Structure formats: structure tokens, C-alpha cells
Image (tube, coloured by chain):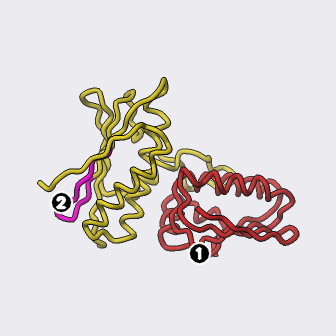
Chain colours: A red, B yellow
Amino acid sequence: MKLTHEKNGTELTVHLSGEMNTLTAPELSALLEKELDGVQNLTLDFTECDYVSSAGLRVLLATYKQMKAAKGNMELANVGEDFMDVLQNTGLDAVFGIF
Amino acid sequence: MTEEYSLRIPAKLEGMDLILAFVSLLLDNHGCAAKVRTKLRMAVEELYVNVTLYAYPSGDGWVEIRGNVENGMATFRLIDGGKPFDPLEKPDPDTLLSGEDREIGGLGIFMVKSMVDELEYEYSGGCNRLTLKKQISEQ
């Protein structure tokens, strides 16, 4: 998985590319651990990532909880069909902001 | 009966790429739709990761994947010689809870159940045997 990000004050956007699976999900955790401090609006862009396994969902859920606790927002952008299936199957489509 | 292919590797997390490559190659050889392939890869990933985490608490072990496609039905079997463990016994997570209340774990097997047509666990001959089946043509 390849990750690129842009930070603009309290806004952070991360673009994911490739598969977020058990082996690669920790890469997103590591990036967020470094960059999330002080961020109020987090956008995760899935334009180039349509494979998210449960390990990836765990990272997303943990990050969502962290953002909520800090009164911030997390949004998933450009979610593809396969990833949307996974979100719907797990009920997480009703939890995360998706657009 | 079409031929069954198999791959046996050490039960380590790092081996996941090999297992997923095996799944992809076999499915691609049978013209599997990309959407179905993604679901099968995810299902196998979840089950494989479970084996690497829980089957051999005291040390090294092996895991074998067997696969075949017959009459448009893909069958994959994951076999290990570790301690008996039925991942399908785990209760499904409550997917209606709000985000704050949702637990971080427990989603993997639930996802597998939603992604395949058939899923079976058996312990026999000293091995855990998980079999998953899915029709590979788009319905």
C-alpha cells in the first residue's frame, strides 16, 4: 500500500493506494500516529484503494473513535463498490461519514 | 473431478502474500470476475490470519491451502495441524451499535460469512479444516 498525505492546519487528507490488508494496515496506523495530533478534520481518500480487510476496518474504527474523542471528524472519500460492500456488510456504513 | 492445487507454507503472517497470490492465480485461470476474486481473497485472508495467530500458540507450524474450480464453483480449503479451533463458533458482532460502542475486533469471521456461499469447519485427522465455496461467475 502507498500512502500520501497533505496537512493544512487542522485538516489532514490521506490518499491510499493499493490494498489495505493485515500486512499493510499498520502503515496507516503509523502515519496517523505521527500526523493526527491537532487534526480536527481527517479525510481518507480511497480513490485508488478498493480492498479493505478487517485489519483495515479495525484501524478505521480505532481512528474514528480517536477523532470523536477529540471532537473531530473523519470522512471516507471516493469509496469504491467493493469497499462499500464491506462497509454495508459490517454495518460500518452507518458509522463513518462516507461521500 | 478437476485437479486440486495446493501450497503448504510455514504458518507465519508474512506468508499471506503467497497464499493470496495462489488464490488469485487459480481464480484468474478460470476467468473469475474481479469482484468475486476480491471477496474470496478477503475471506481467505481473514481465515489465514486466524491460523497464524491462534493455531500454534507454542511455536512454529504449517498451513496448507488447497483450491479447485469445478462447474463455476471455487473451493478453497485451509488446513493446519494446530490446536482445534473453530473460528465459526464465535458469535457475530452487533453491527447495529453506534460507532463509539462498536468493538474493534470480531469483524473478520463475520465478513468471511458474508463473502462466501458456503463455509464449513471440521477437525479431523489431527487437523483443523476450513472449507469455503463460492460461485465465481457474476450472478
Residue appearing at x 47%, y 26% in the figure? B59
Find residue B96 and report its image quarter: bottom right
Task: Read off the residue under disc 1.
Answer: A47
Query: Magenta stretch mostly in which secondary structure?
Result: strand
A48 w.r.t. A26: above or below: below
Residue B71 lies in the magenta-colored region: yes
Same chain for mark 1 and mark 2? The answer is no
* Residue B85 location (% of width, % of height): 40, 32
SS for dot 2? strand
B99 lies left or right of B92: right
Tell me the distance, in whole angstroms, between the alpha carbons under discs 1 and 2. 35 Å
Q: Nearer the viewer, residue B120 or A45?
A: A45
Q: Which residue is mark 2?
A: B70
Could you classify mark 1 by the number of other residues whose Cα lies within 10 Å: few (under 14), some (14-19), or many (20 or more)? some
Q: Quadrant of the C terminus of chain B?
A: bottom left
Q: Position of residue B76 (x, y in %)?
A: 29, 51
Q: Residue furthest top?
A: B58
Give the image quarter of residue B90: top left
- Residue B53 included in the magenta stretch of the image: no
Write down the chain letter for disc 1: A
User: What is the three-letter code of the residue carrying label 2?
Assistant: Glu
The residue range painted magenta reads B65-75
